[in-house]
Image: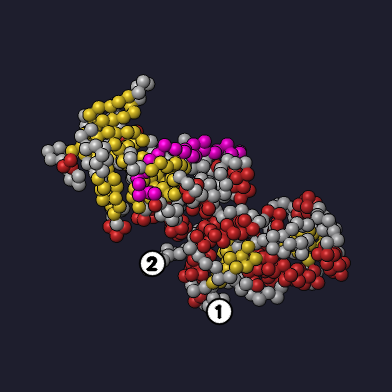
Amino acid sequence: MSTNDTPLPANFIRQIIANDLNTNKHNGRVATRFPPEPNGYLHIGHAKSICLNFGMALENNGTCNLRFDDTNPEKESDEYVQSIMRDVQWLGFSWSELRHASDYFEQLYDYAIQLVERGLAYVDSLSAEEIRAYRGTLTEAGKESPDRNRPIAENLNLFRRMRAGEFDEGQYVLRAKIDMASPNINMRDPAIYRIRRVHHQRTGDAWCIYPMYDYTHCISDALENITHSLCTLEFEDHRPLYDWVLDQLQTPSHPQQIEFARLQLEYTIVSKRKLNLLVTEKHVNGWDDPRMPTLAGLRRAGVTPKAIRDFCERIGLTKQNSWIEMGVLEYCIREDLNENALRVMAVLEPLRVVITNYPDGQVENLEVSNHPQRPELGKRTVPFSKVILIEQDDFSENPPPKYKRLVVSEEVRLRGSYVIRCDSVIKNEAGEVIEIHCSYDPGTLGKNPEGRKVKGVIHWVSEAHALPAEVRLYNRLFTVPQPDNEANFLDALNPHSLETLTACRVEASLAQATTVQRYQFERTGYFCLDAVDGINGGLVFNRTVTLRDGWVKD
């Protein structure tokens, strides 16, 4: 994942792979895979697995396949396939080969026939509820199905007829014959095929039986000659089944499964079912809503691939599940954007300022740096005129202690421009300030006034030249750190997760804004042009993150 010469921090998987290479365990090869199910959009949790699998391959001159686990056609679609490929590439990775579990349907079926012929699998007529009841508990052994000792010839006949479509859904399943008394429930004769009369996005109606994940995954790994099958901790108890299946069959290889702790990020959920609920019930505006923890949402919010890769490297790998503070991700985002975002000025809630002693009709084109620490990013021209706009909260008639912005009879500096002094205010009938009259010091462009100290600096835009924009201020989607722990996670939705400001004015240079570039609205936060609404007419900007952590915990 690292693109420079800085030594990478150690993690236990990196050490395992290094040891395997030293002992020539896999003939000096490293081959990994990223195997998502195309039943939803990828989220921040997947980013950890993507960076790990592709990263380990890159570090060791190995290969990494992208393989779609498309064995559950009821919930899968080409939309999700395309989004997954787009997200992996956006993160900066390229797969060695694009594979699908459905590529192996015929081989998987043939391997199942082998298990049946060897008396290691049988066709069972128990219902799903009966199978669960027969399975037993963590403290009680399961009991054998009445069909467990069905003759091999009868099992072969029934299984072939299952494939031929002679039976209804749920009428039969194919189960591995392992050990109903095993302390590991996953080894108590797990189902490896079930009947599903569902159209498959790739194979159409060619199949009416589909293999189960635990059976499919290990064989797919073996057929692709994967060396290290890296997965999250919930599959640790499934590893004996992974190894059992491969031990019984003459597959090309026997990959090594290694588990690591999944990424659990505070103030988010990563259950695809719950994310789908947020979308279908319109609590958010689609899978790419910037409040969503999906990679599509993070991208639309303006988060960069570099920030996500850095985040995944920083949190490291462990064998212990734990929660990661949202502030860690936000720190990585700010660090990247502080280095690379162009500085611009935008006024989100405008207040009109008339500079009474500035010549009527005059316009100065001021040169302002695009980044104070990176002169190579150049300068831009910012027009200055008699009437400017400032933020409403940058002026106060009754300022609180230590207020360093504009007040009556006091001075403040305009960013990159002159020092101005507030002389008077104009109010409407409700007593609200609607306009400020100021005077400017012509000798303060680029230098401090003589004999007096100006404490504050505020941003501004020229009224005549500023562009109208909609600005969306996104905040955390949930109000509690672990919304999954709530009785109903929807009760923890943050009612203030989005504030839309429609009266904003931004500097003229943003007429050339692109969805690729990131911007720091000076003194306000980091923003990006919305990739959907910001390119179809008016300017629409999304807040990626505030300048500093200002989250207030309830």
Measuring 30% from the left and 32% from the top, which residue is drawn there?
395
Rounded to the nearest angstrom, the CA distance separating label 2 from label 1 is: 28 Å
Amino acid identity at mark 1: Asn
Q: Position of residue 496 (x, y in %)?
A: 49, 36
Residue 446 within the segment the image draws in magenta: no
Among numbered discs 2 and 1, the one appearing first in the sequence: 2
Q: Please provide the residue range marked out in magenta.
A: 487-511
- Which of the image's four quarters has the N terminus? bottom left
- In the rendered structure, which amino acid carries the disc numbered 2? Asn
Q: Which of these two is toward me, 322 or 366?
A: 366
Label of residue 4 in the image: 2
Q: Can I make out residue 325 in this image?
A: no
Residue 2 vertical position relative to residue 283 in the rendered view, above or below = below
Locate residue 174, reporting x and y percent.
Answer: 78, 62
Q: Residue at x 62, y 47 (%)?
A: 276
The residue pinned by badge 1 equals 27
Front-most of residues 303 and 227:
303
Label annotation for residue 41: none
- Residue nearest the observer in this picture, 509 or 159: 509
Percent position (x, y) of residue 214? 68, 62
The answer to whether residue 420 is above or below residue 519 is above
Image quarter for residue 504?
top left
* Residue sticking out furthest to the left: 451
Q: Is residue 391 left or right of residue 235?
A: left
